[in-house]
Amino acid sequence: MLEELEIHNLGPIRSALIAPAGGMTAITGETGAGKSMLLSAIRLISGGPSDGGRVSVGAQEAWAQGVFEVASSPAAVAAAREAGFEPEDGELFLSRKVPASGRSRSMLSGRSVPRSVLASVAAELVTIHGQADQLRIATVSRQREFLDRYAGDEVALAAYGKTWNALRAMDERLERLSSQESSMRQQADYLRESIERINRVDPQPGEMDELRARRDRIENAAEIAEGVTRALGALDASQVVDDVESSSAADLIDHASQALRAIHVEGVFSELADRLDSISTDLSDVVFSLSGEVDNEASMEDLDAINGRIHELDELTRRWGPELSDVITWRDKAVYDLEDLDASPEKVEQLEAERAQLLEAAKKAAQAVSKRRRAAAKELASKVTAELDSLAMGTSKLEIRVAEREQLDATGADDIEFLFTPFPGSPQLPMGKSASGGELSRLMLALELVAAEKHVVAGGTVPPMTFIFDEVDAGVGGKAAVELGARLAKLAQSAQVLVVTHLPQVASWADEQYVVAKGETKDGSIATTISQVRGDERVHEIARMLSGSESETSLEHAEELLKSSVLD
């Protein structure tokens, strides 16, 4: 949701700050006052093209910034995180600087980013329905995306995407096999010989460390034996000498414990005796461990074998190391790579059989997607056509064609086309080529309304989005204008809506209203101001929109219009 839009030195707007309502916000003002600059600012922060000619006269640069609440928009948060940004307090700042001459600068939360990053994040937050912007819906890809969102095809699309990716990977593998050259065959020979050599040695994880430890023990056997013997003699001489006259450490500790227990006076003596018993137990464990080392000796033949094995492993690590684990990892990867380099007829035949199975699975998955798309297309077109009747387009009709084809691609096996008939007898023409700017805006409003209603009825939530409508009221008046305002207000129950309008019947439905006005500044130049109107000020603005004046009659009519513009 757009929480705040700030603009400086953009066209006639020297400085403006707008805080749109969470529901519906109307932007009104006389023709030529500069309402289009608001849309220009939003296009800029959405990653649209910049134009230094729109910088205010006498200013060095224009600047626009939008503050968006994104806590309820997982897609926008994901897009920001992919670009390396974490929202602060659930907000993202999208801004753009446009110099009078030179390249513009895009920023996300205060840090410079490519314009494409700004566009990818804004795409999850803002949808502009203006004459220039909504021509994008005329593209096949946008129409397919809209239909898939309406159909709720996430599971079916994911299943198809998985099979399609597997099929493409197999095609690439077969292509590599069919086009492999002599160098690849040489590479295959090298891998095969290397794998055989490593397998002959058969290195085991951690083997080198174990062998080196054993070698160190053998090479220092005399020193180890002497040290162990002396330690045992000091701790428990009976372990190394049969006839022992002197007491060892173990005996002395036992004697000390017994002497303390012989004291029949309460105090610390029994506690100290317990501690000595504990030391004696630990000492016994040490003696037991050391006694097991006395006979643990290896021969020189063992040393020769160990050195020979270490030499073999060293040879492997010098070529495929530096560590033995690297050798094993290289060998395992080489086995897989060799499969791709093996272009034997049997291998190719096996892969082609696997490809046939993948193709059949992809076709079945694509058929499941097509079935859901056809059902959604019929439902969506019918409901949008019914919705158009309340938007002063009762003779218009939308048809959505889903034509299945043999050739698969990343999106499935369907050619999708939105066809619009503006009036009876008119030929069906692709959407975007058969409607005026106002008609296209109302058609998009109908599409968004039906899509939002579907999510609500299904018990889901409408993806958080800020919708901006321009020219939606072109060619509309009277009762149809009132209904148009009501439909915008209905959409605003599940999304944020900003509408640029010259109709009081539309503006009266808004939760907040901003007036764009052009006037003379202190220095005699012309500038545009943007101000929020509430209470009596709003009544006066609605009256001006109704009759061009603020007479008593128009003011009464304005108050009546505002009171009646409430959804049931």
Image: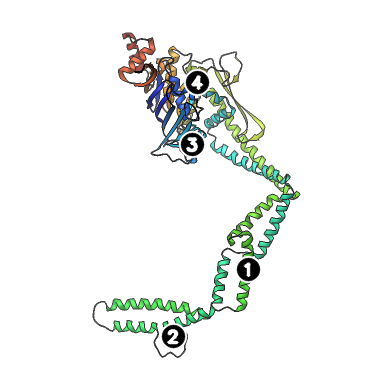
Amino acid type of disc 2?
Ala
Residue neighbourhood size for the residue with mark 1, other residues' Cα within 10 Å, grouped as few (<14), some (14–19), many (≥20): few
Lower sequence index among marks 2 and 3: 3
- Residue for point 71% across, 50% down: 184
Residue 250 to residue 388: above or below: below
Residue neighbourhood size for the residue with mark 4, other residues' Cα within 10 Å, grouped as few (<14), some (14–19), many (≥20): many
Residue 153 to residue 334: above or below: above
Q: Which mark is residue 237?
A: 2
Depth check, front residue: 306 or 175: 306
The residue tagged 1 is 311
Q: Quadrant of the C terminus?
A: top left
Asked whether disc 3 touches disc 4, contact meaning CB atoms under 8 Å apart, the reply is no
Depth check, front residue: 110 or 505: 110
Residue mark closest to the camera, 2 vs 3: 3
C-alpha distance separating marks 1 and 4: 78 Å
Amino acid type of disc 1?
His
Amino acid type of disc 3?
Val
Local secondary structure at mark 4? helix
Local secondary structure at mark 2? helix
The residue tagged 4 is 441
Depth check, front residue: 124 or 326: 326
